[in-house]
Every structure is written in structure tokens, then in C-alpha cells.
Image (spheres, rainbow, N blue to C red):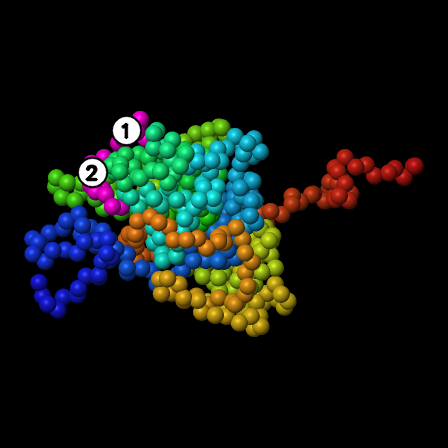
Amino acid sequence: MEHNAPQPPQSPSYIHSRDPNAEDGITLADIPQFIEATQNRSFKGRPHIAELSPQELLLVKCAALLIIAKSPIGDPTLVEEMIEFLETKKGNFWNKLFNKGDKKNLKKKGVFCVPLELLAEREGVDSMLGTASVPLRVPSFIDDIVSAMKQMDMSVEGIFRKNGNIRRMNQVIESLDRDPGSVDLSQDNPVQLAALLKRFLRDLPDPLLTYKLHRVWIMTQNIADAQERGRLLHMVMLLLPRYHRDTLEVLLVFLKWVASFSHVDEETGSKMDLGNLATVITPSILKANKRDGVRDESFPGIRVITELLEEQDELYLVPQDFIALIQEQNYFIATLDQPRELLKKIDTFLRLRHGSNSSTALSGMRPSGPSGPSSSYPSVSTPYSNGSHVDRPSVNTHASDYNTKALPPHPGLPHQAFSSPHSTSRIHTPDPRPSLDEMWAPPSIPSSDSRRDSPRSRPNSFLRPSNDA
């Protein structure tokens, strides 16, 4: 080996340094180190979704909904169904996610069969198992079980495919529901823990990818162009509720790490690559609500999860063409609590933005008053964990349900996330579609219709008084 060759990055303390006297070759201990070294070459110039403030995240979600609405899979009915994912007031999404009858029957104590939002708010932890240096809010069970499995041998054949010991699993579930602190997950084998993780995800009252977005996830597979399909998957993922998106990121990063042990050598390996992992995990995280008469789409669902696993590193970042929304967020302050008006304003902003060659601030659409950006709003350059800087206006954002109180450090095992980012960006400008003003405009009344002259506030059956009276 040449002395002037570049040295590999220093590994964290939980990865044993390689013995200099050992024979050349790749060992199980080397694989996580190689993956981490690849992850260190992170994307530059775009912030991580988890780093956004509630106001910035709302703008990004609105823009994502607009992209879906104007795509081949979008229609006004679909847009109306997804507007609720833009709600920012505490409790709004929770109330709409389940109807009154469902909420009465929901289990609220324990760990299994409890809504993800309730678990994350009640006993969640700030996990560092994602791809950014900022924490993700996930249920403590997710952080504990992934941390425990990261200390185990993942080259066991059939991991996540085998069901493990059912009796032992039921005993652990009962103990977790009674007292989570009494269970030491490190005492079980990796096959048993993988089956337990699948069981937790499958028992969520609302799946990880949500019932309400199931139709949209599946419809993305009708897009033949791989670049456009990947972009739409990115947009749908941005619409996920915060705790679902954070937990999904932890799961995808972990599964990608697990897949690195699928073929260690000719004789060793779990045989569970990304495709096989997607096949066994899809029924637990992407499923239809059978009570609504919707049937599961197995093969399109597996393709969705496979693409999420393969292209996940792009999905955690703010799309490049949404950066302007963060830079000019003061322009939208007046309509933040009006989702439909905010959508129309962002629609106009993006259409004018893409229609000009200027990459600086808005030109020609700066209204006077508090609702538009002006020179009175100073800007600051905000550094993100990946070394990027985005100019943001110095405005005080209101607190929301996304803000959580400071918590003591989680007593779990020390760990870091592993991921292998891709260097290419799948940014694609969608085909021009009618604006939201046209999509949500009331139906026009022909000039020959007598109702045209009647007051709009009166019903269609209103009769005008006769001249003979």
C-alpha cells in the first residue's frame, strides 16, 4: 500500500479499529465503516427536511401538494383529500385521522396497537438514527429496537423474512405493554427482534405510510418515466405527518444498512437485499383500509417501498426548486393559517419563479403591506448540518405542535446512522396544468339559465314574485 494514499475516515468508538496484522479482505466490521464513509460525502446546498421550522415545513408541504395536483395522477378530488395534511394547529390532524367511533376504540396505553402520534408525543425520544445531525422524534420502542439490532450480526440468513418464536414474541409484547423498562431487547436474537419490529409496524392503527395516502403512493407507479416517478414519491413523502416521516426515515436508513449484509461473501450473508426487504416489510407499512372497501395492491406497493429504499437519501432533503420558498417565506405570512389561500399564493409564486430567469428575490410581485416581502425584512444566512447555507428572513415563527420540550438524553446505546447518498438529483419541472384558481372555481351558469339573475345566496328553487301580485 502506498504511504501517500488517502487515509480512511476515523471510525466512531463503537466500530472496532482494524488489526494492522490481519489479512487483507473485507470483514463484517468493515462494512458499516465503508457505508459511513460514503455517507460523509453528503449533499451540499440543500437543508434536511428535519431541519426546517414549522413555517418552512408548511410551505414545502404546500408546494409538494401543488406538484402532485398538477401531475398526471392529480385531480381536484385528490387535492381536497390531502389538504388536511397541511394543518398545523395541534390536534387538527389527530381529529381528522380517526373519526369519533374509531377514537373511542383506540388503545391508548402500552406500546403495541397505539397510534404513532400518541406514542411519539407521550414517550417519544429524540433519535439520532436518521441521516442528519438533527434529532428525529420517534417512539422510544423504535429507537431501542433499532439500536439493539445495530449491535448484532445482521448476516443471519432470512432476517426479516422468518417469523421467529411466536410464543416468545407474545410474551415480550405483554411485558412491553405493561412496563417497557422491564424488557432488555438485547437478550433476544436478531431474527426475533426483526419479527417484533414488523409486528409493531403492522399493528399500528394507521400504517406508517397512512391510509389516506395509500391511493397516492400506489398511483405513482402508473408513471412510466423513472425521474418523474421518483419526484412524485418525494412529494408524497413530504406530505406525511411529522412523526410518520421521522419514523419512516429511521426505518429506511436501518433497512438499507441491513441490506449491506445480504451477500458478505460466497457463503455468508442474509440473502435479504433491498428488493427482498421491501417484499417482506411492505405489508406492514403500506396497506389499504379494508373498511373503506379498498383492496391492497401488493406488487405496486412493493415497487413503492423498493424505490424509497433505493433513492431514500434524496427524499430527506428539500427539493432544489423549493429553496426559494424558504428564502422568501415572509411573502406568505398573512395566509399561513388559510391553507387554500396559501396554496394559491404559492402556486402563483412558483409559476412566476419558473417563468423568469432570475435566481434572486421576486420581481414584479412584491405587494406593499405585511403580506409581501420588502426591504424592511432583513435576511440571515442559516447554516445547516450538511454545510449548506440558505438565506432566511429573520422573522419570529409561531410555535406549533412540532415543537417539543427539551428532553434528557435517551439512555439507549450510542449509535450513528448509516446511509449511502446518491449524487444525482431527480429534479423535474412538471407539465403545466391549470392553476388552483381554475381547479377550485365554482361552476359557471349559462346566460340562458334563469337562475343567473337570482341572488346567489338563495337556493335554486327560489321563485321571483310575479308582476301580477
Could you tell me residue 398's position as x and y percent?
56, 58
- Quarter of the image that includes the C terminus: top right
Magenta stretch, overall SS: loop
Q: In the figure, is residue 285 to the left or right of 266?
A: right
Identify the residue at horizontal 20%, vertical 36% (top origin): 157
Residue at the location (46% across, 48% down)?
A: 242
- Marks 2 and 1, Cα distance to the nearest angstrom? 16 Å
**Viewer-proximal residue among 446 and 42:** 42
- Asked whether 166 falls inside the magenta stretch, the response is yes
Discs 2/1, front = 1
- What amino acid is at disc 2? Val
For the question of whether residue 45 can be seen, the reply is no
Q: Quadrant of residue 244?
A: top left
Q: Disc 2 designates what residue? A: 156
Q: Residue at x 15, y 40 (%)?
A: 268
Mark 2 or mark 1: name the one nearer the start of the chain.
2
Magenta segment boundaries in residue numbering: 150-169
List the single residue furthest toward the top: 167
Q: Which residue is mark 1?
A: 165
Secondary structure beneath dot 1 equals: loop
- Helix or strand or loop: what does disc 2 sit on? loop
Q: Amino acid at mark 1?
A: Asn
Q: Is residue 238 above or below residue 323?
A: above
- Camera-nearest residue between 392 and 194: 194
Point out residue 114 in the picture as x, y percentages from the top left corner. Answer: 45, 36
- Residue 303 lies left or right of residue 212; in this view the side is left
State yes or no: residue 383 in magenta. no
Question: Which label number is shown at residue 89?
Answer: none
The answer to whether any part of residue 467 appears in the image is: yes
Q: Residue at x 10, y 67 (%)?
A: 3
Residue reaching furthest to the front: 182
